Image: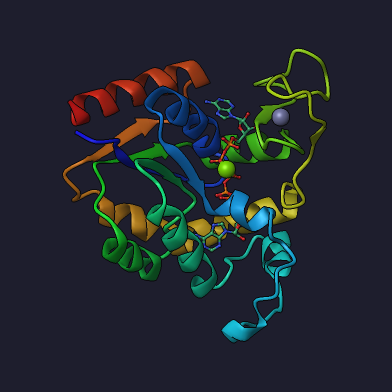
Amino acid sequence: MSQPRLLILGPPGAGKGTQSANIADEYDVSHVTTGDALRANKDMDISDMDTEYDTPREYMEAGDLVPDAVVNAIVDEALDSADGFVLDGYPRNPEQAEELAGMTDLDVVLSLSVSREELVDRLTGRRVCDDCGASYHVEFNQPETEGVCGECGGKLIQREDDDEESVRNRLDVFDENTAPVIDHYEDHDGFVAIDGEQPPDEVWSDIRRAIDERTE
Ligand code: AP5
Ligand code: MG
Ligand code: ZN
């Protein structure tokens, strides 16, 4: 098989970014993530797409979804130039799922599940590298040197949407918009449910086994 085409689903804080980094390394695929792409372009002018706000920033800081037209275009372009990918953060509603079905087939669909209280703890304690985006946690996943990225030496910061109010809204937006998307993928041949509540290494070994079984 050529490079695998993987989708990773799960609520905010489930570990999509953490595990996508492992997947991209191990299987030599591109990490396509709408969250990172939007954070790098928070102030781009989207007013010509007939949106409520003129930039992604307002939506993201509140933890609301950025309009579909903006994210569909990001994913379409990224997948076009990828030979194998792990897609993280998209699709987030049924309309985006339909759009994705028109762009590509998928070999494996991973779904990480984690309880709500654990998600709140993970997100409010998360620190991310300002340079390379690597994820850490003040308690569960500490860097070797406090405040410094172990990958690139960059500075660790807190994401603007990781305050408790935005976190709770993001979890509500997930329940309302994205949970139905996950139900829809349960019928996919490559679907596999992963217990995301385990320690990161155990989640990773379950993911690796699931991908290997489905891509031989
Ligand atoms: P996005 O960046 O995608 O955020 P999210 O879905 O809220 O997910 P997170 O990145 O917060 O969580 P994650 O699952 O990656 O967890 P992580 O590995 O970091 O989206 C942000 C915003 O952009 C959205 O709110 C929206 O506005 C917009 N947007 C993006 N895509 C969009 C789309 N398609 N449509 C519309 N709008 C869109 O882990 C979390 C923490 O837990 C870390 O601290 C980590 O170290 C720790 N951790 C990880 N695994 C474990 C473990 N097993 N045990 C203990 N701790 C762990
Ligand atoms: Mg993420
Ligand atoms: Zn870094």
Residue 73 x %, y %: 48, 67
Residue 213 % position (x, y): 20, 24
State the image coordinates of residue 216 (x, y, percent, origin top left). Answer: 17, 25
Q: Residue at x 62, y 65 (%)?
A: 64
Q: Quadrant of the rendered structure where residue 60 is?
A: bottom right
Count of picture labels = 0
Residue 92 makes an appearance in the image: no
Q: Is residue 53 left or right of residue 26?
A: right
Q: Is residue 204 shown to the viewer in this render?
A: yes
- Tell me the quarter of the picture where residue 149 sits: top right
Compared to 143, does 77 lie above or below? Answer: below
The residue lying toward the viewer, choosing from 216 and 208, is 216
Residue at image location 81% in from the left, 15% down from the top = 145
Assign the N terminus to one quadrant of the image.
top left
Compared across the picture, whether 166 is left or right of 145 comes to left
In the picture as drawn, the residue positioned furthest to the front comes out as 81
Residue found 60% across the figure and 53% down from its top: 37
Ligand 2 appears in which quadrant?
A: top right
Nearest the viewer among 56 and 45 is: 45
Q: Is residue 83 above or below residue 76?
A: above
| 6, above or below 146, in the image | below
- State the residue at coordinates (77%, 51%): 160
The colour scheme of the drawn protein is rainbow
Residue 25, how many percent across, how many down? 47, 25
